[in-house]
Image (cartoon, helix red, strand yellow):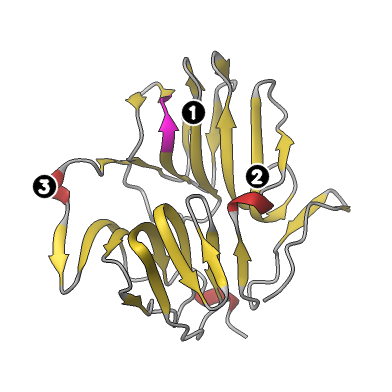
Amino acid sequence: MAPTRWPQQVHMTMLVNSDFSHRVTVTADEHHWVPSPQSGVTRAMLDRLGGEQARATSLVRYAPASMFPAHSHPGGEEILVLSGTFSDGSGHYGPGWYLRNPPGSAHQPSSVDGALIFVKLWQMPADDTRALRVDTHDPSVWRRDGAHEVCLLHRTDHEQVSLLRLLPGHALQPDARGGAELLVLDGQLLDKATVLGPSGWLRLPPGDGSELRAGAFGVTLYLKTGHLAGFAT
């Protein structure tokens, strides 16, 4: 496992877990919260490659009554609301809402009561033009797949995004031919000797065939696969 690397300013570039050929595990107690440019908004960077506008994966925490100025997302933005209420011009979104804002979109995000969100920036191709809003607490968006329950959120030829529910002790071997990324939402995920609880994050490089396992009370997690194929060595 590669060590977590926190931001270092190198020619205006911040590098956090920027070697995508390495396996990275970050437990919740390893999150390093740092201020964003906007008062009341802090973030824990999971991976980052670039300056203030960067290819980045982060947890972002909004204090009550905090707001970002209106801004655009040339490389797109993917959001999963973990707690509180996240708002922008398209609506108000509580825990479990999944949002995709395509490249070239713009908004003014805020939170009246505070919120914690999982965010991925600058990771969409230019032809990924569909805005998406999914309430993952709606039972109709879930289906049974063997021993797992799956909520498919987004799928293209290059990536698949879903939520999974695994029964206690059940194994999971993600299709990591193009890399895989997991965020624990509830329960525990066992990764070799590491136990990942809520907000624990795991990134598998392309070709990593690791088998993971749900903890004693099962696990609910976010899973994204295929999106790291360009980083294969």
Name the kind of residue labelled 2 in the image: Ala
- Given residues 186 and 40, the one toward you in this image is 186
Image location of residue 215, percent across then percent down: 39, 66
Q: Which is more N-terminal, label 1 or label 3?
A: 1
Q: Residues within 10 Å of mark 3 (few under 14, many from 20)?
A: few
In screen coordinates, is 47 left or right of 113?
A: right
For image coordinates 53% across by 56% down, the residue present is 200
For image coordinates 52% across by 61% down, the residue present is 196
In screen coordinates, is 5 left or right of 62?
A: right
Say which residue label 1 marks.
115
Say which residue label 2 marks.
44
Q: Residues within 10 Å of mark 2 (few under 14, many from 20)?
A: many
Q: Which is more N-terminal, label 1 or label 2?
A: 2
Q: What secondary structure prevails in the magenta region?
A: strand
Q: Tag 2, which secondary structure?
A: strand
Say which residue label 3 marks.
140
Position above or below: 103 against 107: below
The stretch in magenta equals 82-86
User: Do the residues bearing badges 2 and 3 touch, measured as CB atoms within 8 Å?
Assistant: no
For image coordinates 35% across by 29% down, the residue present is 94
Q: Give residue 225's quadrant in the image.
A: bottom left
Magenta-colored stretch includes residue 187: no
Q: CA distance from mark 2 to mark 3?
A: 32 Å
Q: Tag 3, which secondary structure?
A: helix
Name the kind of residue labelled 3 in the image: Ser
- Given residues 208 and 197, the one toward you in this image is 197
